[in-house]
Image (cartoon, coloured by chain):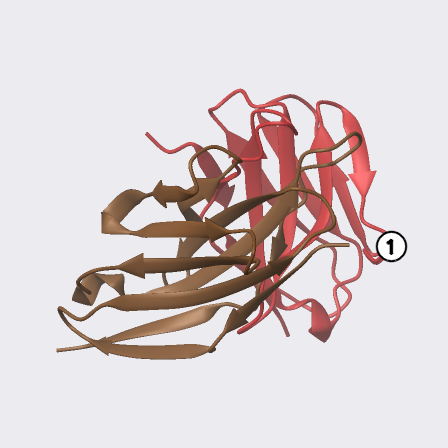
Chain colours: A red, B brown
Amino acid sequence: DAMVIQNPRYQVTQFGKPVTLSCSQTLNHNVMYWYQQKSSQAPKLLFHYYDKDFNNEADTPDNFQSRRPNTSFCFLDIRSPGLGDAAMYLCAASRDRSSYEQYFGPGTRLTVT
Amino acid sequence: AQSVTQLGSHVSVSEGALVLLRCNYSSSVPPYLFWYVQYPNQGLQLLLKYTSAATLVKGINGFEAEFKKSETSFHLTKPSAHMSDAAEYFCAVTHRSSGNTGKLIFGQGTTLQVKP
């Protein structure tokens, strides 16, 4: 029944230790998005994939990378997490960029110690 | 550029009372507008969307919103609040034009508290 799945739901990593968050979708949608949501703030788009085409937001730090090996899966890599990267990371999928309805996963809450 | 302003970061209503959450947008092109709800430690769930069809949009859980171009508003209402409506609500805007990525611009959110 789940459409967008994120694992793990909670992730703890150490300062500077690389971490990978994963997202999968059963919708077979073309577009996948990664948002960062800090405490009591609105979600902020980091980047998205339209099929295999990667699109980075201009203000997304270089510390954040993404991979999409196939339609179903998308990964968020944080190369050297800092304390300021502690946040909820939300993955979303959309049929295409013209439909604009995005289906969100439950999120991964990242803690950096 | 597009932006969204949600008036009131916290709204408190009694159970059974009218819910009104305010959203104003700014967009130089015809917008698409959305309301999402977020429960603690959960993702966002779409409540309703406006995509240039009917200006009064009905969504899930008894919510509805009216697009008013003259007021650049898209306020969310529900006639009778239920305890389960307590959550964070986000208004978001995007638009359909050449090259648009579908990027959602979110408001800062409104926390709805429902008192027994």
x, y percentage for residue A97? Answer: 66, 29
Residue at the spot 47% in from the left edge and 38% down from the top edge: A5
Q: Is residue B92 above or below residue A66?
A: below
The local secondary structure at tag 1 comes to loop
The quadrant where residue A94 appears: top right
Q: As drawn, is B89 to the left or to the right of A19?
A: left
What amino acid type should be assigned to the residue bearing mark 1?
Asp
Residue B42 visible in image: no
Quadrant containing the C terminus of chain A is: bottom right
x, y percentage for residue B113? Answer: 29, 75
Q: Is residue A49 above or below residue A61?
A: above
Q: Is residue A77 above or below residue A113?
A: above
Chain assignment, label 1: A
Camera-nearest residue between A69 and B40: B40
Category of crowding for the residue at label 1, using alpha-carbon neighbours closer than 10 angstroms: few (below 14), some (14–19), many (at least 20): few
Q: As drawn, is B36 to the left or to the right of A21?
A: left
Residue at the spot 60% in from the left edge and 29% down from the top edge: A73
Residue at the spot 76% in from the left edge and 24% down from the top edge: A52
Residue A65 visible in image: yes
Camera-nearest residue between B111 and B95: B95
Residue at the spot 20% in from the left edge and 65% down from the top edge: B81
Quadrant containing the N terminus of chain A is: top left
The quadrant where residue B83 appears: bottom left
Residue occupied by mark 1: A62
x, y percentage for residue B86? Answer: 28, 67
x, y percentage for residue A30? Answer: 63, 23
Camera-nearest residue between A74 and A38: A38
